[in-house]
Amino acid sequence: MKTQLPNKDGYFGEYGGSFLPEQLQVIIDEITTSYEETRKDPEFQKELQDLLKNYVGRPSPIFHAKKLSKKIGGAQIYFKREDLNHTGAHKINHCLGQALLAKKMGKKKIIAETGAGQHGVALATAAALTGLECDIYMGEVDIEKEHPNVVRMKILGAKVIPVGDGRKTLKEAVDAAFMAYVKDPITQLYAIGSVVGPHPFPMMVRDFQQVVGEEAYDQFQQMTGKLPDNLVACVGGGSNAIGLFTAFLEEENINIYGVEPAGKSFKDGEHAATLTLGKPGIIHGFKCYLLQDEDAEPMKVYSVASGLDYPGVGPQHSYLKDIGRINYKTIGDKEAIEAFFEISREEGLIPALESAHAIAYAIQLAGELKLDQTILVNLSGRGDKDIDFIAKTYGAEYNL
Ligand SMILES: *Cc1c(COP(=O)(O)O)cnc(C)c1O
């Protein structure tokens, strides 16, 4: 399954592909060709492996959350510790991959959009390391909200370019970054933040993230003598989830759960549960499940975890939902916040709010399963970035 898909046109079943103006398609085809060549280059692979080990700190360990599991009294919960990576999340895995690819293609600059700033920081880090210039497009509203990440990007030497169109957030930033890329595709490479966008991005980002599952496959057996019975990961665009899941997709006895944000409610504009409530449509040049209005325009979305609020989702997830291989569930803000405090206080791990969605679902699931069952959760990132928000919003309730 993992080697067959996508097909040569970038389709996972009916999803994915590339819906772009002709002029842009020519440019993107060049990335596909370069990537296909580069990924077979042993020198590229060696360089990437070396950086993942000595710069990112891979392999990330697996931790058995014994105290939490005991308290629940059901299945045993384990965490794949992507929060321990340099820069604090899984995103560095695909940012390094794309930055190295840009170097191999002879590019001088790498550009991208960012919403909350996590992709921007990871990419600015990879750019500094590989000696590339870095332009990050960011909505003016997000620049205001995510001040520490804006400063981080600038410290790392990146240029943060404010986008003042429309709602001044992520969608407008994507449009602006794409436009800038089309203007100069010769010296620049566009680097996407998840398994989304036109082919080859969903495939490429998946390939760079699948190290997470490959490590876990061996580590978990060494620890427990078996493979995990269940896998859980949160799904925004879907990169940390597909990164963990890919190595296990063909193990039919393993139940796999992707967790989407139910936000405040299932009312339009108050959630980002794309696979649960969306319908197939087109966004940013690819086909996927999409939260859309009557005019097929992407809907406004919301989650307390800003890394999860995207109205589309990776095409491979859309396909895996249709064929029934992965179960997609939802967790709302409230349950995510409870899980955030629960594992902070039971295990001394402050998770990213995105990851807290996966943990919340794993806690529910563990309660329904027997003691000898296991759940491996992708702890996609650490929560340092979220503590100011938590203090402001939930400080009174949790005695902070
Ligand atoms: C960005 C982010 C996510 C969501 O992105 P995916 O592509 O769905 O993985 C999840 N967790 C953390 C910590 C993030 O920074």
Image (tube, helix red, strand yellow):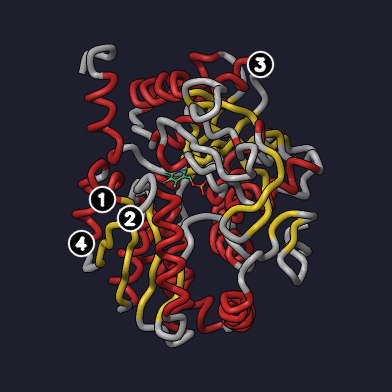
The numbered disc on residue 149 is 1
Marks 1/3 in contact by CB < 8 Å: the verdict is no
Label 4 to label 1: alpha-carbon separation: 9 Å
- Amino acid type of the residue that numbered disc 2 sits on in the rendered structure: Met
Q: Residue 91 in the image: x percent, y percent?
A: 44, 55
Label 3 to label 4: alpha-carbon separation: 47 Å
First along the sequence among labels 1 and 3: 1
Q: Secondary structure at mark 2?
A: strand
Label 1 to label 2: alpha-carbon separation: 11 Å
Mark 3 neighbour density, 10 Å: few (under 14) some (14–19) many (20 or more): few
Q: Which residue is mark 2?
A: 138
- Amino acid type of the residue that numbered disc 1 sits on in the rendered structure: Asn
Q: Residue 153 in the image: x percent, y percent?
A: 25, 59
Q: Is residue 217 above or below residue 22?
A: above
Mark 2 neighbour density, 10 Å: few (under 14) some (14–19) many (20 or more): many
Q: Which residue is mark 4?
A: 154
Foreground residue among 240 and 392: 392
Residue 141 in the figure: left or right of residue 354: left
Q: Nearer the viewer, mark 1 or mark 3?
A: 1
First along the sequence among labels 4 and 1: 1
Label 2 to label 3: alpha-carbon separation: 42 Å
Q: Residue at x 32, y 68 (%)?
A: 135
Q: Residue 203 in the image: x percent, y percent?
A: 63, 63
**Image quarter in which the C terminus is found:** top left
First along the sequence among labels 2 and 4: 2
Mark 1 neighbour density, 10 Å: few (under 14) some (14–19) many (20 or more): some
Q: Which residue is mark 3?
A: 368
